[in-house]
Image (cartoon, rainbow, N blue to C red):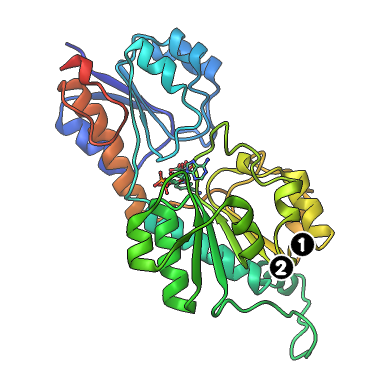
Amino acid sequence: MRKSVYITRTVPEIALQHLKDNGIEYTVWTERRHQSEEELIPILKDYDAIIVSGPLKVNRAFLEACSHLRIVSMMSVGYDNVDVAAAKELGIAVGNTPGVLSGATADTAFLLLLAASRKAFHMHKEIIRGNWNFWDPTANLGLELKGKTLGIVGLGRIGFELAQRCIGAYGMKLIYHNRGTNEEAERELGAVRVSFDELLQQSDVVSVHTALTPETKELFNKEAFSKMKPNAIFVNTARGGIHNEADLIAALENGTIWGAGLDVTNPEPMAADNPLLNMHNVAVLPHIGSATIDTRNAMAAIAAKNVIRTFEGKALEHAVVENIHRL
Ligand SMILES: NC(=O)c1ccc[n+]([C@@H]2O[C@H](COP(=O)([O-])OP(=O)(O)OC[C@H]3O[C@@H](n4cnc5c(N)ncnc54)[C@H](O)[C@@H]3O)[C@@H](O)[C@H]2O)c1
Ligand SMILES: O=C(O)[C@H](O)CO
């Protein structure tokens, strides 16, 4: 049986090597733009599988048009752009790449937290413009993190690694809000589970690490920001849809909260004139949470192995929708 996979963006070589070693034909879309669903659907008629990197809407309509696919292999841990119920109904496996990217993404959250707390990105821009305002005792002042309270909404793999960094570096106290109890974090990091409102009220840093779901969509809105401390920093490395961007801008402009660090925005990319890009206490990155050489290699390898295992009729390395019905 012919086995072929379409890969929506250039991926690390290790993925291609795994596919070659297993006799799987592949095509890589090498242009530096994401193809639309409309462009992809006719192309995919000639393929048995797809490796997805990017914001492709793998919704019911897309899956129904491509119901011959054996697997949608996500090169990401997040799968909020996939209609999982439709994939299950149609018998299409869905794989993802959890765990291997937790450290790199936690590093990005930590970087954004530090950058926002010390206005680092703003001052970097000022230097480029030739504005060196140094040794001014009352200018460029930031916030310190030592002994402060870190509140994590969605304390899973990435949140745990961020907490380790904040506790190790600054002895921060950890509170969290989750659907369930994270016993490991309570035991190893002294985490205390609180309600969402208690977390907003008590935290000096609020970092969100849930998936984007109907429950978390715009969870951080005007009401949520209004409950936070005026010197609090909001960090989002999860998904831009979890915050309402207009409400975030207003909260920062009004001094409702102190600063923000964002690896994800709503929408992506954000407009070049977005006020967040010119705020002193805000650090923005273009969704690079997992973008290290090691991590992207590891993600690419899992994405390829999930395809290979599907063609072999084996359980996926990491499954959102298992291909078990094919065994
Ligand atoms: N910026 C990036 O490049 C990047 C990289 C990796 C992951 N992400 C995002 O980070 C998310 C988290 O990844 P992870 O591997 O840590 O996931 P995870 O599943 O290990 O952790 C998520 C946690 O959120 C909790 N949760 C889910 N819904 C909740 C709700 N409504 N209220 C409170 N808690 C809730 C879960 O119980 C879980 O503990 C991903 O879904 C993805 O969207 C972004
Ligand atoms: O979910 C993930 O893995 C990252 O956001 C990359 O899309």
Q: Position of residue 322 (x, y in %)?
A: 27, 25
- Crowding at mark 2 (Cα within 10 Å: few <14, some 14-19, many 20+): some
Q: Secondary structure at mark 2?
A: helix
Q: Amino acid at mark 1?
A: Met
Q: Position of residue 269 (x, y in %)?
A: 65, 41
Q: At x 42% / y 22%, what residue is drawn?
A: 84
Q: Secondary structure at mark 1?
A: loop
Mark 1, residue position: 279
Q: Amino acid at mark 2?
A: His
Asked if labels 2 and 1 touch by Cβ distance under 8 angstroms, the answer is yes
Mark 1 or 2: the one toward you: 1
Q: At x 25% / y 31%, what residue is drawn?
A: 306
Residue 31, placed above or below residue 106: above
Residue 292, placed above or below residue 55: below
Q: At x 15% / y 17%, what residue is drawn?
A: 327
Q: Position of residue 103 (x, y in %)?
A: 38, 58
- Crowding at mark 1 (Cα within 10 Å: few <14, some 14-19, many 20+): some
Mark 2, residue position: 122
Q: Is residue 272 visible?
A: no
Marks 1 and 2 sit apart, C-alpha to C-alpha, by 7 Å
Residue 18's image quarter? Answer: top left
- Is 170 on the left or on the right of 203, as rendered? left
Q: Pick out the residue farthest to the right.
A: 254
Q: Position of residue 133 (x, y in %)?
A: 78, 83
Q: Nearer the viewer, residue 85 or 36?
A: 85
Circle nearer the N terminus (1, 2): 2
- Is 55 on the left or on the right of 240, as rendered? left
Q: Nearer the viewer, residue 279 or 157?
A: 157
